[in-house]
Image (cartoon, helix red, strand yellow):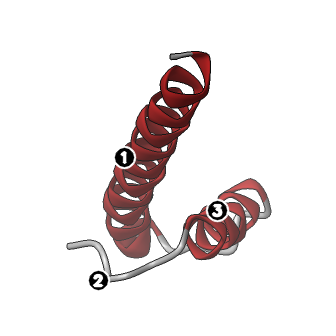
Amino acid sequence: MPKKNITYSQAMNELETILAQIENDELEMDDLIEKVKRSSELLQVCKNKLTQTDAEIQKIINTIES
């Protein structure tokens, strides 16, 4: 389950760490599935934050253009 109040930067940093571990064969096979699950959660966090940010920016732009 994703951490509460994780920032976009924190999620990206954790994703980069996991990716580096996978690329460098630093993970045991038993740990790999957990890291893949965590990566999926982090990607969802990033996607949600990007979607929310885009919606807020669109509101601001629409207000300015009105």
Of 39 and 60, nearer the camera is 60
**Mark on residue 6?**
none
Between residue 48 and residue 42, name the one nearer to us: 48
What is the distance, in whole Å, between disc 3 and disc 1 at their CAs?
A: 13 Å
Identify whether 36 is placed above or below 7: above
- Residue located at (29% from left, 83% from top): 4
Q: Which type of secondary structure does the marked residue at label 3 adopt? A: helix
Q: What amino acid does circle 3 point to?
A: Met
Locate residue 13, reporting x and y percent: 69, 71
Left/right placement of residue 23 relative to residue 7 reads right
Q: Considering the image in quadrants, where does the N terminus appear?
A: bottom left
- Mark 1: amino acid: Asn
Q: Earlier in the sequence, mark 3 or mark 1?
A: 3
Q: Earlier in the sequence, mark 3 or mark 2?
A: 2
Residue position marked by numbered label 1 in the rendering: 48
| Residue 36 occupies quadrant | bottom left
| x and y percentages locating residue 2 in the rendered image | 28, 72
The quadrant where residue 8 appears: bottom right
- Residue positioned 50% across, 74% down in the render: 28
For mark 1, give the secondary structure. Answer: helix
- Disc nearest the viewer among 3 and 2: 2
Residue 12 tag number:
3
- Position of 34 with respect to 26 (left or right) is left
Does label 2 or label 1 sit earlier along the sequence?
A: 2
Q: Nearer the viewer, residue 60 or 66?
A: 66
Calculate the distance from the C-alpha at mark 3 to the C-alpha at mark 2.
15 Å
Residue 62: image location, x then y, percent: 50, 21
Which residue lies at the image location 68% right of the left edge and 74% below the top edge? 26
Q: Residue at x 50, y 29 (%)?
A: 63
Please state which of the two labelled residues, at mark 3 or mark 1, is closer to the viewer.
1
| Identity of the residue furthest to the front in this view | 66
Q: Which mark is residue 4?
A: 2
